[in-house]
Image (cartoon, grey):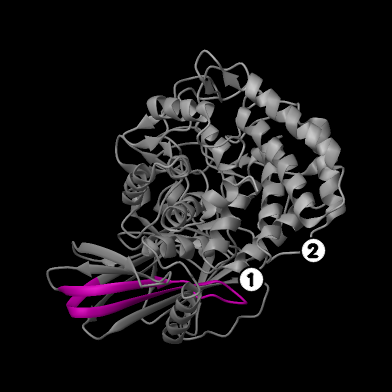
Amino acid sequence: MPAAIADYALIGDCETAALVDRNGSIDWLCLPRFDSPACFAALLGSPENGRWQLRPHDDARVARRYRPRTLILETEFRTATGKATLIDFMPLHKGNPRIIRIVRGDRGEIRMEMDLAIRFDYGLTVPWVTQQNGLLFAVAGPHRLVLRSSVPTQGRGLHTVADFSVKAGETARFVLLYENSFDPARSRASAKSALKGTETWWRNWAARCRYRGRGADAVQRSLITLKALIYARTGGIVAAPTTSLPEQPSAWRNWDYRYCWVRDATFTLLGLFHTGYHQEARRWKEWLIRAVAGSVEQMQVMYGVTGERLLREWEVRWLQGYKHARPVRVGNAASEQLQLDIYGELFDVLHQARSSAQIRGEDIDFQLAVLEHLEKIWRQPDHGIWEVRGRPRHFTHSKVMVWVAFDRAIRSAERFRRRAPLAKWRVIRQEIHQEICSLGFDREAGSFVQSYGSKQIDASLLLLPLVGFLPPTDCRIRSTVRRIEKELMRRGFVMRYTTDPHDGRPVKEGAFLPCSFWLADYYLLAGRRKAAIKLLERLLKARNDVGLLSEEYDVQNRSLTGNFPQALSHVALINTIISIYTRHGPARQRSSTR
């Protein structure tokens, strides 16, 4: 049985990532990149679906941490006979991905054991394993993993195992390298030099952060996590490195998050800019422009890390799912949905980028074509921010983001003197605004609602003041937030909705963490700074022991749920802290009507 989600930590090389549990087991790893098939899939199955465990033979007390300002994980084991530290990391590379594991003896003597089960193709394919010149080769089709170990290993029941001891001052080193099976073997750098180089690289990168205020440690850990989720070759940012971690126990709503969502663009851009990471922000924006380029009618909600569009969804039927939560899905059918809010995100991120004076050169003709297309389709129902798999609706948030698209296009044209049909755009902007205030607002309930004609409240409505649709002090916004506080708050966290728009049933999922950060941002904009700080402090306590957040939080069991770690949760944390503790943070910038 896999560990609790909060018991995992992340290591990565900015092209792929692995999850390591508190007992030294790597239960998830896709090679050679984030969305490749997993070779360790125990997270969604059993150890027979692939894992790599290094742990003491005897019972141990465990403590862990990241080395300061790095993604190097240290897990400390204390037994009756001594203490040892397991150091896990993935060096950044321009060739082939590697995982390096070093067991360092700190005190006394500890007996350790290793269990390596390699299973390519999401835990299905058992490789052919051979040993040559002290190296272990595991080959299946195009894949080859090469293990170099400083201790003897042996085969046992389709696993590679080792039993060894480390005394104080001794180390045992393990390097697992991925290669194409049809390529020549590559040179092997030493684990010691790789550790030093990796630590130096992460510390130098972290030193570029220009935020030094309260909560700086939390901001820095979230930035490092976000950096680990940026595909280095293109600048695309995956929503999470995992698939099918359930939003609720034993549920069917398990999705593949190893792709890049247009919806996250503006939040991410602002978080990177306000912390000084202009290069990452620029590359993210450039990835976005490349990904959406082409026929404007074919713009998608999400893309692969290099801009792939074909993300066909299928079920991995041989995996039992995380704690038996089936199905396990690869690909994401939501990529084929109409979600109107992505147009607002596209134009907002371009407007914010221009305003920063850091980014230039986007295709104006393409943007004009997008708005011409949006003018034709904005009255259609869509699947909304929550990507419902049921019938399309006229979601209020979606229509607001259509308004954002025209609003940002108008503001950019006015400010930067761009050629544009401004008179027509202003008429459309006003028409959309009036329709939302008429059809998206329920006078009886005194609030905006999830969709036209609905009585349901929805946490996405918190974004209305955050994107400048109405001022945070507007009476309609205030009454909407009061209703969200009354109906969607659970033990201080914000649920997305009370009735599931997928099937109309009461929800049983956890609180969607970004929504709670949005509420903190609203409190700040509305002049309720103390309430914003109180909510932020509650959210910071939801992180696990190494500072990571998932997609959702089970308030009943006080546990993290959903795909992990979640980029949007960490972006929201960064933006909220900076907004609260600086004079002009992301919340004020995005909500500004100038």
Q: In this view, does 506 lie above or below 463?
A: above
Q: Where is residue 517 in the image (x, y as percent from the top left)?
A: 44, 45
The dot on residue 559 is none
Q: Give the prevailing secondary structure in the magenta stretch.
A: strand
Identity of the amino acid at label 2?
A: Gly
At 62% from the left edge and 36% from the top edge, which residue is drawn? 469
> Which image quadrant for residue 77?
bottom left
Q: Position of residue 293 (x, y in %)?
A: 80, 53
Residue 88 is covered by the magenta coloring: yes
- Comparing labels 2 and 1, the label whose residue is closer to the camera: 2
Evaluate if marks 2 and 1 touch, with contact meaning CB atoms under 8 Å apart.
no
At 61% from the left edge and 66% from the top edge, which residue is drawn? 280
SS of the residue at dot 2? Answer: loop
Q: Is residue 162 above or below residue 8?
A: below
Residue denoted by label 2: 361
Q: In this view, does 233 lie above or below 167?
A: above
182 vs 30, left or right, is right
Q: Give the range drawn in magenta.
A: 82-111
Q: Where is residue 106 in the image (x, y as percent from the top left)?
A: 22, 79
Disc nearer the start of the sequence (2/1): 1
**Disc 2 packing (10 Å; few <14; some 14–19; many ≥20):** few
Number of numbered discs: 2
Between residue 575 and residue 541, name the one nearer to us: 575
Q: Can the viewer see residue 525? A: yes
Residue denoted by label 1: 181
Identity of the amino acid at label 1?
A: Ser
Q: Which residue lies furthest to the top in this view?
A: 444
Q: Can the viewer see residue 239? A: no
